[in-house]
Image (cartoon, helix red, strand yellow):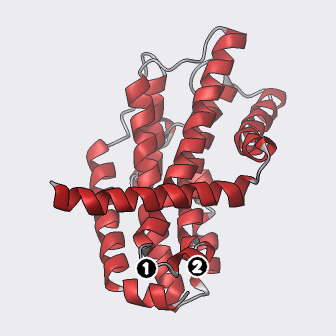
Amino acid sequence: MSTLGGPLQTAGRNIWALILRDMQTQFGNQSLGYLWALMEPLGMIIVLGLIFHFAGRSAPLGESSILFFATGVIPLRIYTQTVGKVSKAVKRGQSMLYFPIIKPIDVFIAPVFLQASTMFLVLVVFFLGFQLFEGEGLPDDWFGTFLPLFFLAMFGFSIGVINAVIIRFFSAWEKIWKLLNRPTFLLSGIFFLADSMPHSVQQFLYFNPFLHCIEWIRTGYYAGYESQFYDPSYVLATLGVLMFLALLLERMFRRQIMESV
């Protein structure tokens, strides 16, 4: 136990130090920086809700389009923000990698905690605020609503590590990935329910694990709603493959990653 505890404690201290460093870099000394991280996705949700309102369109599920968008925009941002930060983790953490005690995997893990916890907080604040002012907004099933958020963060970590390794040998991949990832916003259920799509479209959308996660979240959030589309086994299988590949690549090319700093 002590043999295992030592490395784990060291890794924990390293990751915590990197999280504090990332907070300092990303948000600065002022609380306004962290407040902006909370307000930015909320502003996006309100704008989308207003567009639907003035267009005379109702929410695909529930009575509030703002709540519907909240259960799509914020969860997807957990993935997009995490994959972006993890992909650039080595570049941003170059100075830390000069210390032998810091490993690339530590640098990759730290932004996952920071980005995921920030978006978790945004979602909780949104639900509580809506409950306070509108008398509704709390999830029907808290566990079912928040568990898929963890999987979205792990997707961000896995794909981010894979991207970071590819970028190490092929720098143009960073721009290529941005282009490839753009349709994710439109295809992950922010504006629609997968069950409402034609069967032929559902067959295509089935391969998008993020859509499964958002359908899973809405199944937990909305009382009486049970998505027939989402498949937890597909989410776990896809995540398992990506996680294995990410950790394998990180271990195989750790020396090259270290030499790049």
Q: CA distance from mark 1 to mark 2?
A: 12 Å
Q: Give the answer, above or below, for where 139 lies relative to 123.
A: above
The part of the image, by quadrant, that contains residue 81 is bottom right
The percent coordinates of residue 63 (x first, y second) are 64, 17
Instruction: Give the residue displayed 43% in from the left and 24% down from the top.
Output: 142
Q: Amino acid at mark 2?
A: Gln
Under circle 1, the secondary element is loop
Residue that carries the numbered disc 2 in the rendered image: 94
The percent coordinates of residue 228 (x first, y second) are 36, 34
User: What quarter of the picture does the C terminus occupy?
Assistant: bottom right
Q: Residues within 10 Å of mark 2 (few under 14, many from 20)?
A: some
User: What quarter of the picture does the N terminus occupy?
Assistant: bottom left
Q: Amino acid at mark 1?
A: Pro
Q: Give the answer, above or below, for where 149 lies relative to 179.
A: above
Which residue occupies the foreground of this view, 118 or 213? 118
Instruction: Give the residue displayed 46% in from the left and 85% down from the top.
Output: 257
